[in-house]
Amino acid sequence: QILLKNMEEKYPKVKITLDNFKTQKIVKPLIDKFIKRKLSWDEKSDYIEEIGTLWELCKCTLTNIEDEDAVFSLIEKHWLFEHFSEPDNICEILQEIKKENLRMLFEEGIINFSDQLYIPVNEIKDKNWTVPPYLLFYNILVDEAQDTNRCQQVLIFFLKRKGARCIFVGDKFQAIYEFSGADA
């Protein structure tokens, strides 16, 4: 609702559509641009998958894609590029992906599932967007809190009214959503 309301106000001619393959469509042409050696079809598919997974994890964890140490820490933690080496310019690739990701939203209205949280969190944080008053709450209860990622956690605090409380209930021994950036 935050995304729809702000897009409606600032980009009224753009109709929002969901594309589950948005990330792969962005990454595919970047492989040829940034990886200069000849790749087999399997290698290219692996790079698309791994770089796409890394981008989605960066969004979910709100990792600074300009910080090489943070990006490589994410690569190591999630065992990415285990069977082949990551591109030397991975941060540059991620920045290109981000630029195209935002262009696709603002010009074409195309989002994927993780954009529904990532884009509002960043636009609110940068003070470009606001949370509609009807989405602000006095009490927020988060069950299974161990399975929330950083992006979800930040959004929860954007949904608080002044003086509100948030209650998080979780069990770090049941954490199963690390693949999506959750960190108990």
Image (tube, rainbow, N blue to C red):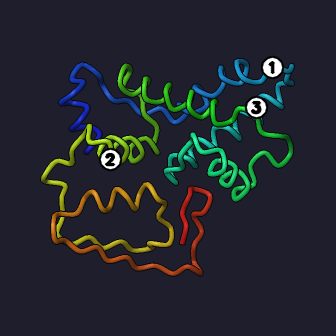
* Image spot of residue 155 (x, y percent): 34, 56
User: Nearer the N terminus, badge 2 or badge 3?
Assistant: 3
Q: Quadrant of residue 144?
A: bottom left
Q: Quadrant of residue 159?
A: bottom left
**Nearest the eye: 153 or 173:** 153
**Nearest the eye: 113 or 118:** 118
Residue 36: mark in rendering? 1
Residue at 55% x, 67% y is 183
* Image spot of residue 60 (x, y percent): 50, 51
How packed mark 2 is, by other alpha carbons closer than 10 Å (few <14, some 14-19, many 20 or more), is: some
Q: Relative to residue 109, is residue 50 drawn left or right?
A: right
**Nearest the eye: 167 or 126:** 126
Residue at 48% x, 30% y is 101
- The answer to whether residue 114 is visible is yes
Q: Which kind of residue does numbered mark 3 sit on?
A: Ser
Residue 45: mark in rendering? 3
Q: Which kind of residue does numbered mark 2 sit on?
A: Lys
* Image spot of residue 35 (x, y percent): 77, 24
Query: Where is 164 relative to 37, above or below?
Result: below
Q: Secondary structure at mark 3?
A: helix
Look at mark 2 in the image and give the residue it sits on.
Answer: 125
Q: Secondary structure at mark 2?
A: helix
User: Nearer the N terminus, badge 3 or badge 1?
Assistant: 1
Query: Where is 78 relative to 11, above or below?
Result: below
Q: Nearer the viewer, mark 3 or mark 1?
A: 1
* Image spot of residue 14 (x, y percent): 29, 22
Q: Secondary structure at mark 1?
A: loop
Residue at 23% x, 36% y is 6
